[in-house]
Image (cartoon, coloured by chain):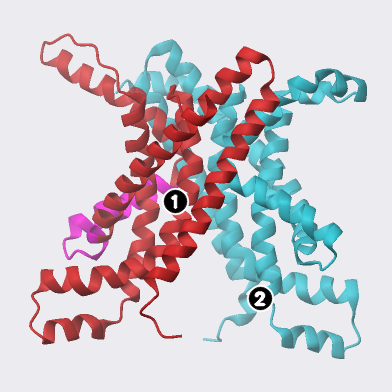
Amino acid sequence: MNWELIWESLPKLLEGAGVTVQITLFSIAIGLLLAVPLALARLSSNKLLNWPATGFVFYFRGTPLLVQLFLIYYGSGQFRELFSDLGLWTYFRNAWFCAVLTLTLNTAAYSAEIFRGAIQAVPRGEIEAGKAFGMSGWLLFRRVTLPKAFRIALPAYGNEVVFLLQATSLVSAITVIDLTGAADLIRSKTFAVYEMYLTAAVLYLIMTYVLVYGFRLLEKRLNAYQRRPV
Amino acid sequence: MLLQGLQMTVLVGLCAMLVAILFGLLGTWGKFSHSRLANWAADTYTTVVRGVPELILLLLVYYGVPKLIQDGAAALGYDMRLDLNPFVAGFLTIGFIYGAFCTEVLRGAFLAVPRGQMEAARAIGMSRTLAFRRVQLPLAMRMALPGLGNVWMVLIKATALISLIQLDELMRKAKLAATATHQPFTFYFLASLLFLAITLVSMLVLKRAETWAKRGVRT
């Protein structure tokens, strides 16, 4: 083990870790916004909403993320002229943009399934109670169903966030210099194989367990009303 | 050409699943063992493997293990050059990673086997190993089947990563075709459809398998 080399490359690795965190946060935030409407579309009895949502979720959960990344980043090149005409080519040429776009769509599909299950698991009594108060439609959904569903979904959603954080390591395959990309770059210059990958692994472990801890705190806080008085 | 890749993907997936189940059984044994050391080893295994991205572990094994052996040999005064076969490195690493997920599934399954079953087996005179083989293991496997099925679905998609260490599986074949024809979208899309096909077939087979495993359960 060459500790000096690890120490010297730490700033570069941390910079990469910053990109990893940034991509994770962007994808999670936008993915969450897409996931709830998607879950509702999956539950809708309207075929025009239900079918596309089901197809979208099935495709993104049934294919490897790496294929999706390549499909969007390299595949968009096949439609270069079309994208140029639409003024979108500057975005699709950018690996960072493609990485966030793919991860967002991917996590939206997985989260939509989690939320669909959670919405279905909201006790009927709570919805009936809401109706008895005269709430209906959007108000009922916003005040009763959604908050409860979010609490039910939280443990599974926490897992999904952790999986997404780890999945971001794949963006190094489409030339984004994230933590894995940075480690790989230094490895190819210095041949310090285990120094680089082990340091990256430790940094990922730290990020993962910070997230796990954070979700545990959030769960405790949101479910505080269920705690028995001591 | 893509179909050859498909074959390789399925092959590497099956080998990896086998390794994963073996590691899973080993990990479960570690978790239930009375030995502190085995407990600690199993806990560390599941914690670390589930906390580090697959790609990092794959690169670590593929580039790290040959270097470790070379450095070791150099220290002993030998000069050797060693390269790991991407197929072997790939399925061993993927198997090792998903072994941690199998450990959790199998642990839950073993816990779900009613205590009375084991007691009954012992009471009619089966030895510990025989009771494990005839009663506990088959029952646990039935309980573990849905969970193992989920692990398989995730595992088969993870094999796409092995293309990054140059194994000629589905994903890499698609990449080669895409570069040769300048039609990346067409070929990556085809590859994704083939992965979808694997998922669909797996779903059907698993459903069959679950009905078969539950044939003795009254509903």
Give the chain coloured red.
B
Instruction: Indicate left or right for B67 with B198 as reference.
Output: left
How far across and down, in percent of the image, does residue A140 sit? 85, 77
Q: Position of residue A55 (x, y in %)?
A: 72, 51
- Regarding mark 2 in the picture, which secondary structure is present there? helix
Subunit under mark 2? A
Q: Nearer the viewer, residue A33 or B175?
A: B175
Tell me if residue B129 is in the magenta stretch. no
Task: Indicate whether B150 appears above or below B59.
Answer: below
Kind of residue at badge 1:
Trp
Range of the magenta residues? B29-50
Q: Which chain's colour is cyan?
A: A
Magenta: main secondary structure equals: helix
Viewer-closest of B19 and A148:
B19
In the rendered image, the vertical position of residue B44 relative to residue A1, given as above or below:
below
The residues tagged by marks 2 and 1 sit, at their Cα atoms, a distance apart of 27 Å
Along the line of sight, which residue is nearer the eye, B173 or A126?
A: B173
Q: Residue at x 83, y 62 (%)?
A: A47
Q: Which quarter of the image is occupied by the N terminus of chain A?
A: top left
Mark 2 vs mark 1: give the one in front: 1
> Which chain does the residue under circle 1 lie in?
B
Mark 1: give few (<14), some (14-19) or many (20+) Cα within 10 Å.
many
Residue at label 1? B152
Marker disc for residue A11: none
Residue A121 is marked as 2
